[in-house]
Amino acid sequence: MIAPDKVKSKGEKLEGQNIRFRAFLKNRADDDELDAHFLRLHKELFSDYDCSKCNNCCKSLTITLDDGEVAAIAGFLGQSASDFAAAHLVEDDGQHAFKARPCEFLGDNGQCGIKSCRPAVCEGYPYTDRPGRLSRMLSVVYSAEVCPVVFEILERLKEIYRFRNRG
């Protein structure tokens, strides 16, 4: 597995190839079969991967929250929703988003300080265990520049589908 501190540069280097692979899959892959490969690889690779040793997602992604998540986190922290929003959030395309990157709730030990009520965006990332990956391959390509597991999933899928880089 690629080291967390290497995934961004290696993912950026392979971005063009990964975009061509996306096009290759769009023309050749069966949705259900691809989802099954994603799910199998997700389970296999995350089964022994410690995300707290990486946390690239917490360090680099914009995290959006809905009103319910704002209220839940504020309550967890013992704050009003408006005080929490004023201190920690900005508006991003009409949504609430954390101001800080890396996420200010990421502890020095790599653990999430609001894990019991963390946003769905965080809970579900990188979504490689969800159906519909073929229609969301562009987000997978970009996640391969953040998450070592997604990077590995893409590399293994290239082998499964016998993708040969074409230029």
Image: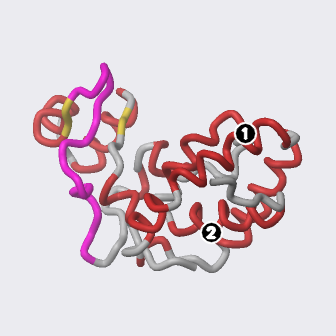
Tag 2: residue type? Glu
Question: Few, some or many C-alpha atoms within 10 Å of disc 2 (few <14, some 14-19, many ≥20)?
Answer: some
Residue 141 visible in image: yes
Image quadrant assignment for residue 88: top left
- The residue wearing badge 2 is 152
Instruction: Please give left or right for residue 69 compared with residue 28 in the image.
Output: left
- The residue wearing badge 1 is 134
Work out whether residue 36 or residue 77 is closer to the camera in this orientation and state it: 36
Image quadrant assignment for residue 149: bottom right
Instruction: Please give left or right for residue 160 compared with residue 116 in the image.
Output: right
Work out whether residue 165 or residue 154 is closer to the camera in this orientation and state it: 165
Cβ–Cβ below 8 Å for labels 1 and 2?
no
Q: Is residue 152 magenta?
A: no
In the rendered image, the quadrant that contains the C terminus is: bottom right
Question: Few, some or many C-alpha atoms within 10 Å of disc 1 (few <14, some 14-19, many ≥20)?
Answer: many
Label 1 vs label 2: CA separation?
A: 17 Å
Secondary element under disc 1, as helix, strand or loop, is helix
Residue found 75% across the figure and 60% down from its top = 164
In the rendered image, the quadrant that contains the N terminus is: bottom right
Q: As drawn, which residue projects farthest toward the front?
A: 167
Residue found 36% across the figure and 70% down from its top = 111
The way the protein has been coloured in the rendering is: secondary structure
Q: Position of residue 159 (x, y in %)?
A: 78, 66
Magenta-highlighted residues: 91-108
Residue 146 visible in image: no
Image quadrant assignment for residue 105: bottom left
Tell me the chief SS of the magenta region.
loop
Secondary element under disc 2, as helix, strand or loop, is helix
Q: How many marks?
A: 2
Q: Position of residue 86 (x, y in %)?
A: 11, 33
Q: Position of residue 76 (x, y in %)?
A: 30, 49
